[in-house]
Structure formats: structure tokens, C-alpha cells
Image (tube, rainbow, N blue to C red):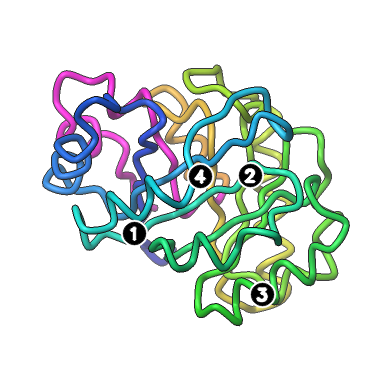
Amino acid sequence: MKRRKVLIAPSILSADFACLEREIIAVEKAGADLIHLDVMDGMFVPNITFGPLVISAIRKVTNLPFDVHLMIEAPERYLEEFAKAGADWISVHAEATPHLHRAVSKIKELGKKAGVALNPHTPIDTIKYILDELDYVVIMSVNPGFGGQSFIPSSLNKIRELKKLIESLEKEILIEIDGGVNQKTVLDVVKAGADVLVAGSAVFKAESYETAIKNLRVST
């Protein structure tokens, strides 16, 4: 079987916001591939986090790609702002807009990698007719809105189903898994077909960020 690199994307949702610059520099030095940024609006999900101003402020801290996960209603309203703020990857939720194709097209027009995120209850068929236009798909393995939740086991079958669909298209579309990824779940997640692992507590709550990232980095 061809070996592949699994990308690690620490989520700053679990970082120390009083020392955000230091935290980002630390995970970069520890071997992170991406910085995952969870944007929440208090409507699509219960919590509120941050917006383009914070992303713009931390953009100068690192050259790592910013993986911006928009957990907001009608995300198409703000795509240009997030692109200008420094996002490299932008994902929108299929459940958050009736104009998913329009949102994906806009992200690509802005020169960014386009992704669609799916909540645990949302079937893969939801993106069947737009999949070939995506750069990546985010499978939520927890219900979005809070960090530190436990992994939902049924997510593994969802990853496998998506992997088969991607292989049938013969296109390079990454599968990103978000929620409950840690040393106990990572092997199953990667074997199922995940390419990008979002890790919050598993990295930022560890004594050593470098050790935590090394333990998550699994190649198959």
C-alpha cells in the first residue's frame, strides 16, 4: 500500500488565548502542518469565538497554512473577509447555507482551498454532486461548537464511505477529521482514510506539543 503523510492541524480553540502568539509558534516548532481556526457565530453553534480581525492579527506569527473552519450561518457573506485576513483553506458547513455550490465557487475564486464540513448526522450524499469541486471534506466526529468532546464511533464508517466515493472520482480530495482525535482514536481514523487530523486538546493540553504531534502522526 502506498504510504502517505497524514497532516496534523492543531486547533487553537484549545490553546491559551492569553498567549496565542507563543502557542502558535510552539506548535509550529513542534511539527504542525496547519493551524486550525474554529470560527463560531453563536447561531449555527452555541459558542462565539473570533473573526477576521483575530486571524489577521495572528497571520504574521507563522507561515503555516491557516485552515479556517466556518461554523457560521450563511458563510458566503464573509468569505472575502476571511480570505483577506489570511485564510488558506476555508470550509463551510453544508447545513449552514442553501447555496453551497455558490459558497464553494466563491472560495475557489478567491484562490483558496475549498472544503465542506458535515455534522455527525449529515449523510455523505449531501455533497455527492459537488464533491469533485472540493479540495477537502471535513467530517465532524463530534457535534460542533465545543472543544474536548469524545469521538463519535460511527464517524469511521462515514470516513470509509467518503473514501470510496473519492476513489471512484479518481481525484485528490483530502478527508479531514475534526473532533475527539487523540492517541486512542488516531489509528482507527487514519486506517479509515483520514488525511488531515484536527487536534485541539490532544496537542494543547499535552505536556509536550512535539511528543503529542509525533504520536498523532501516523502513516499507512
Residue at which label 3 appears = 106
Question: Which of disc 2 and disc 4 is earlier in sequence?
Answer: 2
Question: In the visual, does 140 lie left or right of 205?
Answer: right
Residue at which label 1 appears = 5
Q: Position of residue 148 (x, y in %)?
A: 47, 18
Question: Which of disc 4 and disc 1 is earlier in sequence?
Answer: 1
Please say whether residue 161 is one of the residues in the magenta stretch.
no
Question: In the visual, does 27 lie left or right of 189?
Answer: left
Please tell me whether mark 4 or mark 2 is closer to you in this view. Answer: 2
Residue at which label 4 appears = 191
Residue at which label 2 appears = 139
Please, is residue 16 above or below residue 57 in the view? Answer: above
Q: Position of residue 139 (x, y in %)?
A: 63, 44
Category of crowding for the residue at label 3, using alpha-carbon neighbours closer than 10 angstroms: few (below 14), some (14–19), many (at least 20): some
Category of crowding for the residue at label 2, using alpha-carbon neighbours closer than 10 angstroms: few (below 14), some (14–19), many (at least 20): many
Q: Position of residue 20 (x, y in %)?
A: 24, 35
Residue 155: mark in rendering: none
Please, is residue 119 above or below residue 167 in the view? Answer: above
Pointer 3 and pointer 4: residues touching (CB < 8 Å)? Answer: no
Residue at 64%, 24% in the rendered image: 152
Q: Position of residue 179 (x, y in %)?
A: 53, 31
Q: Amino acid at mark 1?
A: Lys
